[in-house]
Image (spheres, rainbow, N blue to C red):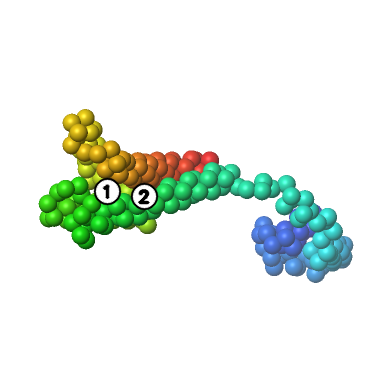
Amino acid sequence: MQCPACREAFSARLDGEPPGVDPAELDRHLAGCAACAGWAERTELVTRRARLAPAPPVPDLTREVLAALPRTLPGARVAARSRLVTSALRLALLAVGVAQAAWAWPALTSGAGAMSAPVHLAHETGAWNLGVAAALLAVAAAPRLAPGTLPFLGTFTALLATLTVADLRAGHVHADRAVAHLLLLAGLSLVATIAWRRRRRSRALPALARDRVAA
Ligand SMILES: [Zn+2]
C-alpha cells in the first residue's frame, strides 16, 4: 500500500466512513511506516480536539426573535371575531327564546291570553308556541341543532306571517297580538344565520386544510 492511499483510507476510517481498502492491510502499513503512523497520530489528535472543542459563543437572540414574531397568528383575529359574533347570536337567541316562552306560558297554563279562543284551542296554541321557544333555546344551547330546526321553524313562521298580515287587513287580530309574532321572525332569522355560518365554516375548513397541505 502506498502512503497516500494509506492516509486517505485512515482519514475515511476516522470519519466513520468505509476506508475502501482492507483494514488489515491499512493497519499493517501503519505499523510498518513511521511517517504514516506519525501523520495518523497527529490527524487523530486534531480530529479529537475539533470534535471536543466547545461551540463558539453565539449571541442570544431569543428576545429579538420573539419580538419579530406577529403578536397574533394569521387568522386568529378572524377566528376570535367569528367566535364573538357566534356568542352574540346565541345570546340574542336565548333572549328571544325566553321571551317566546314567557309569552306562550299563560295560554298553556290557564287557557287565557290566546284572544277569545276556546280553552283547548288556547292550550294548543300555548303548546305550539312553547315548542317553538324550546327549539330556539335548544339552538342557543347547541348551535349544531340549527339546520335541523329550520324546516319546522321556517314553515311555521312563513305561514303564520302570511296569515297574520291577512288577518290584520281583515281586522281578525289586534296589532299587539300580531307584534308578538315578531319574536318568531327574530328567532327564525337568528337560527338561519347560525345555520348559515356553520355551513360556511364547515365548507371553508376542508379548503383551508387542502391549502395548508399544498403549501
Ligand atoms: Zn506510509
- Residue 146 placement (x, y as % from top left): 32, 49
The answer to whether residue 104 is above or below residue 176 is below
For badge 2, the amino acid type reads Val
The residue singled out by tag 2 in the image is 96
Which mark is nearer the camera, 1 or 2? Answer: 2
Quadrant of the image containing the N terminus: bottom right
The answer to whether residue 47 is above or below residue 76 is below
The answer to whether residue 158 is above or below residue 23 is above
The answer to whether residue 15 is visible is yes
The residue singled out by tag 1 in the image is 149
For badge 1, the amino acid type reads Thr
Would you say 115 lies left or right of 142 here? Answer: left
Residue drawn 57% across the image and 45% down it: 77
The answer to whether residue 213 is above or below residue 42 is above
Q: Nearer the viewer, residue 118 or 141?
A: 118
> Disc 1 versus disc 2: distance between alpha carbons?
15 Å
Residue drawn 69% across the image and 65% down it: 23
Would you say 161 lies left or right of 73 here? Answer: left
Q: Nearer the viewer, residue 5 or 96?
A: 96
Q: Earlier in the sequence, mark 1 or mark 2?
A: 2
> Dividing the picture into quarters, in which one does residue 191 lie?
top left
